[in-house]
Image: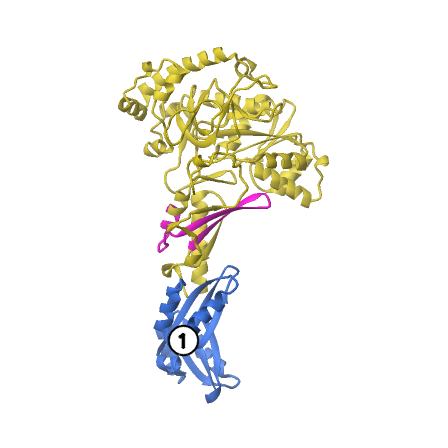
Chain colours: A yellow, B blue
Amino acid sequence: MIFEPEYECMPLDELKTLQLYRLKKQLRRVYEKVKPYRKKMEEAGIKPEDIKSLEDTKYLPFTTKDDFRENYPYGLFATPMEEIVRIHSSSGTTGKPTVVGYTKRDLETWATLTARILSAGGVRKNDIVQIAFGYGLFTGGFGLHYGAEKLGATVIPVSSGQTKRQIMIMKDYGTTALVCTPSYALHIAEVLEEMGISPDELKLRVGLFGAEPWTENMRQEIEKRLGITATDNYGLSEVMGPGVSGECIEAKSGLHIFEDHFYAEVINPETGEPLPEGEWGELVITTLTKEALPLIRYRTRDITKLYREKCPCGRTLVKMAKPSGRTDDMLIVRGVNIFPSQVEEALLEIEGISPHYQIVVDRKGYLDEMEVWVEASEKIFFDSMRKQKELLDTITEHLQQALGVKVKVKLVEPKTLERTAGKAKRVIDRRDLPKYVPEKYLKEN
Amino acid sequence: MKVEQISVFLENKAGRLAEVAQILGENGINIRALSLADTTDFGILRLIVNDRKKAKEVLKNAGFTVGITEVIAVEVDDQPGGLSKILKPLADNEINVEYMYAFVEKSRNKAVLIFKFENIDKAIEVLKANNITILEGEQVYNL
């Protein structure tokens, strides 16, 4: 079912006309109301009225995470605070988190777009939707929550964690649709097996998974083990949260981008040049309707390709391939975004810790596990076991607070940390993640 | 009065202790006493050797994290009640033992106890007041 066929199935020429109209309007607003954007555009010698076609977008300067940091917390907002009704932000207490705001209308748009995603993924009015994404500053939980309500489905806002409880609820409350990260879905499947519950005893029908990259193999496994149809959806908090794009249950290949609200480009991450449809590169998004936090050419750092094809679902929207890989060193661990630099900053805040560390990410069963190996240098080596363990606890607690994800800290002998060509290798990722991306775009960790 | 002990950080991996022993052996360093404290992830090896400076140097060069800690060595008769005689006055004076280990000196029929105290000076005072023999560093290194 299509939630808003008037937009999702728009003829291409009409869609492009709408995009251009909204883009121009957005640019005028941004130029007038957001100083940092105005400054950037002035530096680039470009004015809103210079943009006469969608292709002209390429003359606009990019926006990056650094712009968020430099204008922390509210500097990129285009509306006064009294019009902002909700704040979300990235996790982490080190460095500056990314803060995003929504007006009332933004929240309505957001709910509509996640309703579209849910609808595309097979959720109907009579479904019972269990949302096992975290509720809080993370956009996952609240984002899909309001979309499911908008769709008229029954929402169980269980939030993340407590797997046995999730399963009890799933079984007793008759959940038919599951919303979480794909790795958590597999973890649920595993615990189901341990508990001796067969998927036949559940009413689960569909699952909508996002917030981390996953492979086709994982999809097949989730579908088989939970007895459901699984679809992927994509979003990022800077742009809005979930609701940027999603797969349709008919094709289950490629995520339809809601082009009436987002203008998508794929660029060569090294040169910044836009790439033609079908070529792999970095996804860049311009928001077309956002009031509180409009973004112009935001570099998502996610690697994908854009393509148009006649889709059995009837949507005319462009598709993006399942995002796979990043152009920066960001890791996604259990749906939480982590930069190695955050780990480094957090470690340096503890006295005596040398900056020699390594992040090891692995998948135990189906859940990501993150270990941080810290060099036991002389400064943090105590002859007393008690002091040594206290230090270990301090580091663990500090990292968990800073990263918002469970971390196991290990003290290692200095020579244990792998060094490649004299340079410390910061990240060892042993997970099986999607890797069908041209090598040249993958930045070495 | 104080003895310098070498501490080595060890990961819990097969062969690490053997490596330490080999390095010390190859460099002609003799181990007088040792103890190993361990957790599931790491261990702390404590050693008293005849040449602590050299031991620290060769282990550091081999990539180990090495520390030097002051401990004290006490000598008692190798007979029942020997340890109790020492611990009693320490307990009476509320002195905490952080850790200890012992070895027997066959030739002199004595036992040597190595103690780590939080307050080492106070411990020495109490032991002395109770006429307990505290060995000098050199005595221990050259046992």
Quarter holding the N terminus of chain A is top right
Residue B118 relative to residue A134: left or right: left
Q: Dot 1: within a 10 Å radius of its alpha carbon, few (fewer than 14), some, or many (20 or more) residues?
A: some
Q: Where is residue A117 drawn, in percent x and y?
A: 56, 24
Q: Reply yes or no: does residue A346 show up in magenta.
A: yes
Please give the range of residues in magenta. A345-374
Residue A168 relative to residue A370: left or right: right
Q: Quadrant of residue B1?
A: bottom left
Q: Reply yes or no: does residue A181 show up in magenta.
A: no
**A293 or A87: nearer the eye?**
A293
Residue B94 showing in the rendered view? no
**B117 or A237: nearer the eye?**
A237
Residue that mark 1 sits on:
B29
Q: Where is residue A366 drawn, in percent x and y?
A: 59, 43
Quarter holding the C terminus of chain A is top left
Q: Where is residue A334 drawn, in percent x and y?
A: 52, 40
**A177 or A152: nearer the eye?**
A177
Could you tell me how many numbered marks the image carries? 1
Q: Residue at x 45, y 68 (%)?
A: B20
